[in-house]
């Protein structure tokens, strides 16, 4: 399970540019401070608590926090498979603006 989450995280990090809202990459995963100054190219450094990390990894963690808490945690894997499946390739980027899994169910159509 841990490995699977890590894979998700790495994939999200690689695709973070079209998956996430801009501010997600400006939010600190440690203290939740949001500031454009936090992001400096590929490096994230929190202006408040000093947390430092790869900017895309930091953003990916914020996506995990946002998307997969509460009820979404239960459909985490289904959500990834149906919306953000890495195997679909770069040609099938999810629609911008509404990354929420509307109508996500457990049905797996052939
Ligand atoms: Zn911070």
Image (cartoon, rainbow, N blue to C red):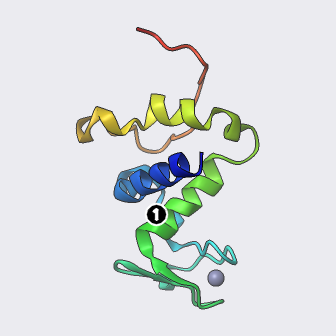
Residue at far left of view: 91
In the image, what residue occupies the spot 25% across and 42% down?
Answer: 90
Provide the secondary structure element on which disc 1 rests: helix
In the image, what residue occupies the spot 36% across and 52% down?
Answer: 18
| Residue 70 or residue 18, whichever sits in front | 70
Residue at which label 1 appears:
22
In the image, what residue occupies the spot 30% across and 32% down?
Answer: 88
Q: Position of residue 12 (x, y in %)?
A: 43, 53
Residue at far right of view: 70
Is disc 1 surrounded by few (<14), some (14 to 19) or many (20+) residues within 10 Å?
A: few
Residue 33 vertical placement versus 6 (above, below): below
Residue 2 as seen in the image, left or right of residue 57: right
The N terminus is located in which quarter?
Answer: top right
Ligand 1, seen in the image, is in the quarter at: bottom right
Residue 47 as seen in the image, left or right of residue 82: right
Residue 40 vertical placement versus 14 (above, below): below
């Amino acid at each position: 399970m841990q490995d699977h989450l890590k894979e998700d995280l790495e994939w999200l990090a690689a695709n973070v540019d079209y998956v996430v809202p801009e501010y997600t990459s400006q939010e600190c995963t440690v203290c939740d401070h949001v500031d454009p100054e936090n992001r400096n190219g590929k490096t994230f450094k929190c202006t408040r608590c000093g947390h430092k990390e790869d900017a895309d990894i930091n953003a990916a963690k914020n996506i995990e926090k946002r998307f997969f808490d509460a009820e979404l945690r239960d459909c985490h894997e289904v959500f990834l498979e149906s919306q953000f499946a890495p195997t679909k390739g770069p040609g099938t980027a999810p629609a911008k603006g509404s990354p929420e899994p509307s109508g996500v169910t457990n049905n797996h159509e052939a």
